[in-house]
Amino acid sequence: MRLFEGTPFDRPPRCEKCEQLEAECVCPPEPAFRIPPEQQTAKLSVEKRKKGKRVTVVRGLPVEGNDLPDLLKQLKDRCGAGGTLKEEELEIQGEQLDRARETLLQLGFKVKG
C-alpha cells in the first residue's frame, strides 16, 4: 500500500477547464494581464516612511485585472530594490520613480506622476 493511495494527492493533476491530465491538456495559457496594459493608468508617487525612509508607490492598477505579484517582481528586478504588495499598492524601496516609470511604459501602461 502506498502512502497517499486513495487520497486526492494520489491522483495526477488535471486541467480545471478541460478536465484532461495536465500533461495532455491543450488549453491555451491565460495571459499575464487580463485587462490590456494600454487601458490602465498607473499612478506613481514617492512617500516618506518612518525614520526618513522613502518608498516609491504604484497605485491605480486593479487586482482582478492584473498579476500584481509578477508585476512587482519585474519592478523590483529592474530597480534593484526590495518591495511589497499592500492591498492594491505596489511599494518599492527607495526613490525609484524614474526606473519604475520606464519599466511600466515598456510594459505598455499609461503612467501619471
Image (cartoon, grey):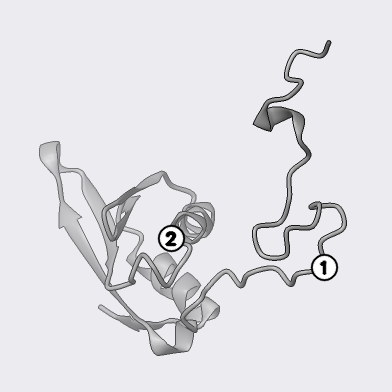
Name which quarter of the figure residue 19 lies in. bottom right
Label 2 crowding class (10 Å Cα cut-off): few <14, some 14-19, many 20+?
some
Furthest toward the bottom, the residue is: 39
**Residue at horizontal 69 percent and vertical 29 percent from the top:** 9
The amino acid type found where label 2 is placed reads Leu
Name which quarter of the figure residue 3 lies in. top right
The amino acid type found where label 1 is placed reads Val
Query: Which residue is the site of mark 1?
Result: 26
User: Cα distance, mark 2 to mark 1?
Assistant: 26 Å
Give the mark, 2 or 1, whose residue is nearer the N terminus: 1
Residue 95 in the image: x percent, y percent? Answer: 30, 57
66 lies above or below 95? below
Q: Secondary structure at mark 1?
A: loop
Query: Which residue is the site of mark 2?
Result: 68
Residue 33 in the image: x percent, y percent? Answer: 52, 73
Q: Foreground mark, 2 or 1?
A: 1
Residue 64 in the image: x percent, y percent? Answer: 39, 68
Can you say which quadrant of the picture contains the C terminus? bottom left
